[in-house]
Amino acid sequence: MSKRIVLALSLIGLIHVGSAFADDKSDAQAKVDAAKTETCEKSKKFLAEQDAKGKCRDENAEAKKVTCSASTFKQVSDLQTKCITAKPTADKPATPAATPKCRALDTKDKTNVFAEAEQKSQLKCLQLLIPELRKKWCTAENKGKKFDYMTDYDHTIGGKKIKGRKESITCKTVEK
């Protein structure tokens, strides 16, 4: 009889452990489902923001039709991925960047522009500025004089604007 009691108690214990395990599993699944629903809502918000910027209009329209839940999470996530990886279409070409400019500025009043040139290459742009400055400054009465100026660039390297620096030219000959 004691073996049967021990066996019965063991079975009851296993059933109890099994139901506790099932409760933990359902709690974990509920948390996963809640996270998926929250992510779905954030993805829909992202698509709406992109639509406001004029991007991903089709993806946002599709996402608006979806009610977020754990089961619809993947559908909205795929729309967001499609939006992020989309390339500009032929009817909406990317706007070409303007050709960068360089300027020769007054060293004291950096708003006073002596000369300006437009060229993709920063070095070539500077080479275009120098003849303009010589025409402006190198007259007969200025022969042998040194003129200082500050360079200013629209050009960038690695997304950072190139810093201007103080430069000078000496008028050795008279420019015509």
Image: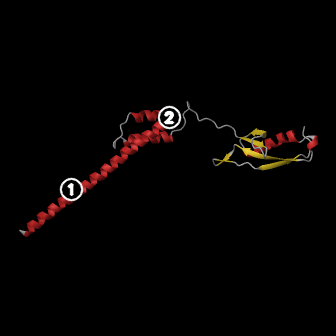
Q: Quadrant of the N terminus?
A: bottom left
**Farthest residue, direction bottom:** 2
Looking at numbered disc 2 in the image, what kind of residue is underneath it? Ala
| Picture residue at 53% right of the left edge, 38% below the top | 87
**Farthest residue, direction front:** 109
Q: x%, y% of residue 131? A: 84, 41
Looking at numbered disc 1 in the image, what kind of residue is underneath it? Ser
**Farthest residue, direction left:** 1
Q: N-terminal of the two: label 2 or label 1?
A: 1
Inspect this view and state whether residue 78 appears: no
Q: Of the numbered discs in the image, which one, if any, rests on residue 52?
A: 2
Between label 2 and label 1, give the one nearer the viewer: 2
| Picture residue at 48% right of the left edge, 39% below the top | 83
Q: x%, y% of residue 115? A: 79, 39
| Picture residue at 89% right of the left edge, 45% below the top | 171
| Image height of 126 relative to 57, above or below | below
Badge 2 crowding class, 10 Å Cα cut-off, few under 14, some 14 to 19, many 20 or more, is few
Mark pair 2, 1: CA separation: 50 Å
Q: Quadrant of the C terminus?
A: top right
Secondary structure category for the residue under label 1: helix
Q: Of the numbered discs in the image, which one, if any, rests on residue 120?
A: none
| Picture residue at 48% right of the left edge, 33% below the top | 57
Q: x%, y% of residue 103? A: 76, 42
**Farthest residue, direction right:** 140
Q: x%, y% of residue 169? A: 85, 47
Q: Give 171 or 12, whichever is nearer the viewer.
A: 171
- Judge left or right: residue 171 versus residue 67: right
Does the CB distance between marks 2 and 1 fall below 8 Å?
no
Inspect this view and state whether residue 9 appears: yes
Secondary structure category for the residue under label 2: helix
| Image height of 20 relative to 72, above or below | below
Report which residue position mark 1 lands on: 19
